[in-house]
Image (cartoon, rainbow, N blue to C red):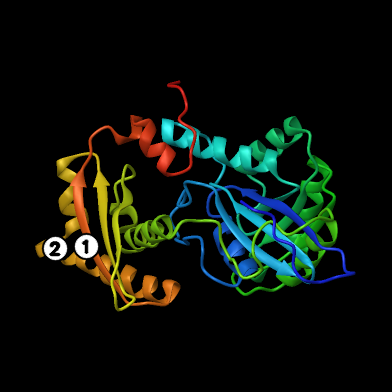
């Protein structure tokens, strides 16, 4: 990753990394998409959608803010869970600033308490962001903010709606003023630090979540196996949805293959919008037993492979 200095003589530039941490479904992916002004992180009602660290890049005047949308922090039970939670805390430890995003509608529960306990151990300052303020009364918001600040001394508190964008610009400007002076880390027009092959896989994975919801096997993943450019500027993308057991294939395929066909059509339409070109998408479903214990699969998701425990 090369440093990029914009042509703005006489005006100091700033750049830094801001990690967004919180419980599953707190709205982290929605917020990073709002910051960036484009969709780079998948958003679904299902918890634990984000598995790896997603990097989005936003500009605020002469400041480049590199946002890291981390997996939701929850009580891990499986190896993949531990890898996801580990990625979240690594993202926080490496960042210049940490945003703790709280779902104001859910309030102060066990998951939030766990995050605050870990935050104390991390020994870092943090910024409190209460999300979904459009769904909660002002007295409730003020009470929640007070309770959270009693538990941990936040450097600042913001109240936003990641969905509507209310309060997001104020938060962005605050962050821009708190990042260190230095050259920009990415080109001015770059919105994300994610290979197109991975972004395409994430788009299809989102459509899987949205279509199947609670029917979707937890141990499922999407990989882009082939990507070929055509002379007319279009792209052919071959993807595989992997499940761990043969009995899970019919869930993803649907009767007569209609479910996977619908998922592929929705994914293709979004890819064409994101990549601004025609896309020929082919999605297959295969069984890969034991992929949850395969270090290579974790590396492809940008996760460390944790020891069994």
Horizontal side of 66 relative to 260 (left or right) equals right
Question: Does residue 41 lie above or below 276 as drawn?
Answer: above
Give the number of the disc on residue 257. Answer: 2
The local crowd at label 1, few if under 14, some if 14 to 19, many if 20 or more residues have their Cα within 10 Å, is many
Instruction: Give the Cα separation between the discs numbered 2 and 1.
Output: 6 Å
Residue position marked by numbered label 1 in the rendering: 260
| Quadrant in which residue 201 is drawn | bottom left
- Where is residue 160 drawn, in percent x and y? 70, 66
Q: Nearer the viewer, residue 71 or 223?
A: 223
Q: Nearer the viewer, residue 104 or 258?
A: 258
Q: Label 2: state its secondary structure.
A: helix
Q: Residue at x 53, y 54 (%)?
A: 25
Question: Is label 2 in contact with label 1 (beta carbons under 8 Å)?
Answer: yes
Q: Residue at x 27, y 72 (%)?
A: 265
- Where is residue 34 drawn, in percent x and y? 61, 69
Horizontal side of 149 relative to 50 (left or right) equals right
- Where is residue 63 drawn, in percent x and y? 77, 64
Give the number of the disc on residue 77. Answer: none
Q: In the current view of this chain or complex, which residue is farthest to the right?
A: 10
Q: Nearer the viewer, residue 138 or 187?
A: 187
Q: Residue at x 59, y 66 (%)?
A: 190
- Where is residue 299 drawn, in percent x and y? 43, 38
Count the marks. 2
Q: Label 1: state its secondary structure.
A: helix
- In this view of the protein, can residue 270 be seen by the observer? yes
Q: In the current view of this chain or complex, which residue is farthest to the left?
A: 256
| Quadrant in which residue 230 is drawn | bottom left
């Amino acid at each position: 990753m090369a440093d990029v200095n914009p042509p703005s003589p006489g005006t100091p530039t700033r750049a830094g990394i801001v990690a967004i941490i919180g419980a599953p479904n707190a709205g982290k992916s929605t917020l990073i998409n709002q910051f960036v002004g484009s969709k780079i992180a998948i958003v679904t009602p299902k918890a634990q959608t984000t598995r790896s660290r997603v990097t989005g890049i936003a500009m605020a005047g002469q400041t480049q803010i590199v946002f890291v949308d981390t997996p939701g922090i929850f009580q891990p039970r499986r190896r993949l869970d531990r890898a996801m939670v580990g990625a979240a805390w690594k993202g926080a430890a490496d960042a210049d600033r940490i945003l703790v995003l709280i779902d104001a509608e859910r309030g102060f529960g066990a998951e939030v308490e766990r995050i605050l306990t870990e935050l104390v151990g991390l020994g870092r300052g943090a910024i409190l962001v209460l999300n979904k303020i459009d769904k909660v009364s002002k007295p409730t918001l003020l009470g929640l903010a007070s309770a959270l600040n009693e538990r941990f001394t936040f450097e600042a508190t913001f109240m936003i709606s990641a969905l509507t964008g209310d309060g997001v610009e104020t938060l962005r400007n605050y962050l821009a003023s708190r990042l260190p002076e230095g050259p920009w880390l990415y080109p001015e027009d770059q919105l994300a630090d994610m290979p197109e092959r991975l972004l395409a896989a994430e788009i299809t994975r989102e459509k899987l979540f949205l279509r199947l919801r609670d029917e979707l096997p937890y141990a499922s993943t999407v990989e882009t196996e082939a990507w070929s450019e055509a002379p007319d500027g279009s792209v052919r993308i071959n993807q595989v949805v992997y499940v761990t057991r043969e009995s899970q294939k019919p869930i993803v395929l649907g009767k007569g293959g209609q479910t996977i066909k619908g998922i592929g059509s929705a994914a293709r339409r979004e890819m064409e919008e994101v990549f601004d070109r025609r896309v020929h998408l082919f999605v297959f479903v295969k069984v890969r037993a034991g992929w949850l214990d395969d270090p290579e699969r974790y590396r492809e998701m940008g996760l460390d492979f944790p020891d069994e425990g």
